[in-house]
């Protein structure tokens, strides 16, 4: 088993898994992909990296940021060498965070960054939407998933009403991610994390 926590389960007891849903810009679903390699291949076709990482050792639920980074050091260093990332950190948002609603709203509108947005899910899950070439790709990322959104790709992110995630982020600049909002309300036309 990888990561620090067991995979979450649904109400029927099945392990949570990554899902890709492809939509037209109008919100009509075109296709659903559930197999990890097929998700990675489909996203690769539009310039988005999607990988599965494994920890070098099992981590306790209360692992420190340093222990988490150490457990994924091989994958982190490989990605840094390939893409020029200069630094990394660990972030966590839990259901008891008093600013969870504010944090969620911060990323719910369509925006772009001048740099890659890279997120590896050490635990928990989150939903990225990417608008590329007339399609919208909804990517439900789960524990063990890495997603790298290229610079200037229109996207938004939903961590849900009760966020519970821990992620590693990688940066090429000290400023990290600075969002430039498009002003388009397209994100309101797509399923939320809970609806997905």
Image (cartoon, rainbow, N blue to C red):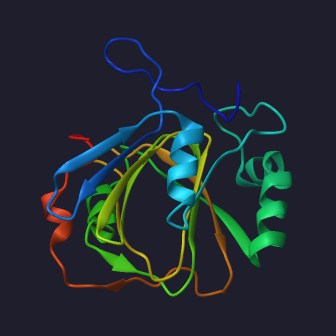
Q: Is residue 100 visible?
A: yes
The quadrant of the picture occupied by the N terminus is: top right
Front in this rendered view, residue 109 or 190: 190
Residue 11 image point, x, y percent: 31, 16
Residue 172 image point, x, y percent: 68, 81
Where 183 sits versus 128, above or below? Answer: below
Position of 45 compared to 144: left or right?
left
The quadrant of the picture occupied by the C terminus is: top left
Occupied quadrant, residue 88: bottom right
Residue for point 77% across, 54% down: 69
Front in this rendered view, residue 10 or 27: 27
Where 33 sits versus 80, above or below? Answer: above
Residue 126 image point, x, y percent: 42, 49
Q: Is residue 99 visible?
A: no
Occupied quadrant, residue 37: top right
Where 91 sits versus 140, above or below? Answer: below
The mark tally for this picture is: 0
Residue for point 54% across, 74% down: 150
Residue 137 image point, x, y percent: 36, 57
Occupied quadrant, residue 140: top left
Residue for point 76% across, 64% down: 79
Farthest residue to the top: give it: 12
Position of 92 compared to 153: left or right?
right
Where 98 sits versus 58, above or below? Answer: below
């Amino acid at each position: 088993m990888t990561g620090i926590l067991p995979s979450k389960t649904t109400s029927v007891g099945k392990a949570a898994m990554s899902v890709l849903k492809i939509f037209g810009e109008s919100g009509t679903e075109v296709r659903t992909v559930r197999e990890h390699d097929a998700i990675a291949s489909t996203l690769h076709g539009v310039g988005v990296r999607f990988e599965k990482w494994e920890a070098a050792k099992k981590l306790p639920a209360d692992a420190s940021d340093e222990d988490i980074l150490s457990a994924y050091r091989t994958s982190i260093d490989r990605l840094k060498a390939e893409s020029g990332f200069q630094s990394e950190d660990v972030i966590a948002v839990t259901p008891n965070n008093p600013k969870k609603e504010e944090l969620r709203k911060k990323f719910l509108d369509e925006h772009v960054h001048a740099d890659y947005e890279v997120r590896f899910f050490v635990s928990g899950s989150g939903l990225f939407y990417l608008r590329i070439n007339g399609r919208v790709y909804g990517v439900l990322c789960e524990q063990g998933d890495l997603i790298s959104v290229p610079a200037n790709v229109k996207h938004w992110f939903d961590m849900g009403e009760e966020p519970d995630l821990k992620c590693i982020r990688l940066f090429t600049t000290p400023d990290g991610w600075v969002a430039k909002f498009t002003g388009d309300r397209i994100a309101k036309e797509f399923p939320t994390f809970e609806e997905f």
